[in-house]
Each structure stands twice: as C-alpha cells, then as structure tokens.
Amino acid sequence: MTPFKLPDLGEGLQSAEIVAWHVAEGEHVVADQPLLSVETEKAVVEIPSPQAGRVARLLARPGDRVDVGAPLLEFEEGPHPDTGTVVGDLERPSEPPRSETDAAASSKSREQPGNVHAAPAVRAKARELGVDLSKVTPSGPGGAITMADVMAIAAAPPREGTALRGARRTMAVNMARAWREVVHATLHDEADIAAWPKQEDVTIRLIRAIIAGCKIEPSMNASFNAETLCLSPNEHIDLGLAIDSPDGLFVPVLRDVAGCLPADWRRQIESFKTGVRQRSLTPADLRNPTITLSNFGTIAGTHAALVIMPPQVAILGAGRVSDRPARDQGGITLHSALPLSLTFDHRTISGGEAARFLRAAIEDLQQAT
C-alpha cells in the first residue's frame, strides 16, 4: 500500500478538518482529481490526488481533525495507468460471482468512511450547511442521500454536547486566544449623519472613516508582537470585514483600502458575501487583516464591547442608526445618529490615541458626501 498524507497547507498551518471525501474505497482516480475537501482558517480547500491509482482505504472520516503529515488514505501498491475514466478501470477483469460471505463483506465496506452516495449538488448543500454526510440516513434509491435528507438534518435542533466543528471551532479557538492575550478597552460615541443623502452606503462610509482615522493615528493600523513587545506600523490598511453567517463569523480582508476606490470596495464586499454563502473563500482571503470593521447595527444593537484578534490592535463597530434630538437653526429636530464603538488594545494604544482616531472618523462620517 502507498499512503497519501495531509500535505503542508502553508502559512504555518498544522492541521485541518476533513469536510468531505470526493472518492470512495475501490475507486480509480486520475492525477489531480479532487480527493477530499478540508477546512482550515474557515476556508474550504480541495486536495488533489498526487497520482493515478486505485484507492485501497480511507483512513479518516468527515469531521476528523488531521495533522499535517498524517495519512489520509492508502493507494494500492504502485500507480495504475490512467485509463481515461475517473471511476472504474477498463482493464480490470470482471469479478466472479460472489458468495453470501463476500456480499456481506462488501456491504460492510460500503459503510467505510467517505463511501457516501450523494449527487454533487447534495454534497455542496451539505458543505454549506455543515452537515456530515457520513451521519445522514439515506432515503433515496440505491442508498443515495437526497437533498431532503440533508435539509432535515440541518433543520434538526443541535444535540446536547455536540462538539464545535469547522468555522465555529475556529471562531471559538480564536476568540479564546484574543480574550487571553489582549487588554481590551472601548470608547463609545456617535456621528450625526443627518446630512447624508438618501440611500447612502453605510459600510462604504465607515471604510472611508477608518482611513481618515488611521491618517491621524497610524498606530491604530499596527501589529503588536506580545513576545518581543514590538509594535510595527503597517504600510497598507488591510481591512477585515466581519460577516455573519449560519456557520459562524467570517472576516475576509479588503486589501490596501486607501489605495482603492469605493466602487472597488463594494465589488469586493459583494464577492466576499458570496464566498461566505458558498464557502468558497480561500485562506488568502482571510489572512492578516491590520484593523477590523464590524457593522453589527444592520442586525441589532447600539454599542458593543468588541474583541480584537491579535496581532491587530483595534476594531471599529457600528450600531443601529436611530433618531436623536438635535438643535437646528434655533429649534429642536430629530437627526439620524450612527453609534460607534472603538475597541483598542490598551497594552499599546493610549486612550488619547484612540480618542483622536475616533474623532477623525466621526468628522469624516458627518460630512454630507
């Protein structure tokens, strides 16, 4: 047998969680054919086959977390010649009739990890909803898992004590690390946005405000190394954008926002939203933000105590817009107010620096255009 091990996924990643197998035991594969999907840093990555050959044995199940270098599957000894087909081998002779014992053994082999019968659309929906196909009872013809089977599992209430997996596991690990390491402090304020034109794009204005704040206080767009106590300024503003999803929180990164146009931001944001829904974000999309924006007010909430993911030192949150009484030409009228919450790492950022950043952001937000 020839083992195939989880390859180095780069960027210092030490392990990955198996999302789904795309091959079954006994199946013939060709070089570069997708063998399985794994999840790391909340991104789903397909791992291709390094050779043509027949899969002898799958060594892990969907949901298992596997270390880099650990065996994933075994090929039958030596690569098989590529016969031009993905499943089956044209040169393989027909098998003799099987006894009842052979049939029982074959039945057991179909229960091995990864040997799941489901159409590509069903597999894609299962990945989107976080459903482990190996734990779904099939109702379709020939033991196939149907779309209804997947939707029924997804709609069922979570079982008590179910372990977090995938993106939610990553979120739990990251948030625990952030809370252990960072000294969080938060400033609250609000911007009067009564001068805005109708249908103004709130997210775009918030991005522009962050750029304005970073111009006044560049230390807010820096990275802090807790081991060396070194604060390093970042040349570009690579803005993490918090996006909510049923699978947990995703934070894809808008690169060098100060060097791009608002139209470019909006196009990239829409692409990220699609990537979150379809679980098609790449690890590069999620890597190394220098400051983060959370526009949680689109759902609910006025102010928040946010969490900073190191080595970042700041995150700006925007709450739900509401009306506030304001003096206007000698009278009192209602103005729209955008609540802001700026959380910063008090190990490196002083209250004065945070306040000056927030003041600059508010001044930018209060401009009509």
Image: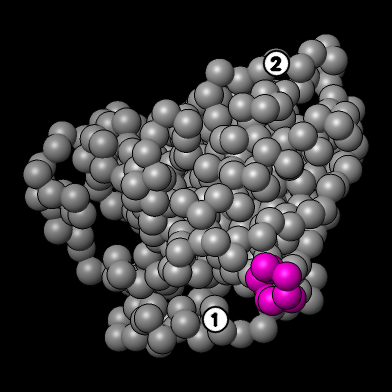
Q: Is residue 43 visible?
A: yes
Q: Nearer the viewer, residue 11 or 14?
A: 11
Q: Residues within 10 Å of mark 2 (few under 14, many from 20)?
A: few
Residue 286 drawn at (x, y percent) = 53, 40
Is 155 displayed left or right of 303 in the figure?
A: left
**Residue under label 1:** 153
Q: Which contiguous range is marked in magenta?
A: 328-335
Q: Is residue 22 above or below residue 254?
A: below
Q: Nearer the viewer, residue 227 or 184?
A: 184
The prevailing secondary structure element of the residues shown in magenta is strand
**Residue under label 2:** 232
Residue 263 drawn at (x, y percent) = 34, 47
From the image, state whether disc 2 or disc 1 is nearer to you: 2
Residue 10 located within the stretch drawn in magenta: no
- At x 68% / y 68%, what residue is drawn? 328
Residue 233 drawn at (x, y percent) = 66, 18
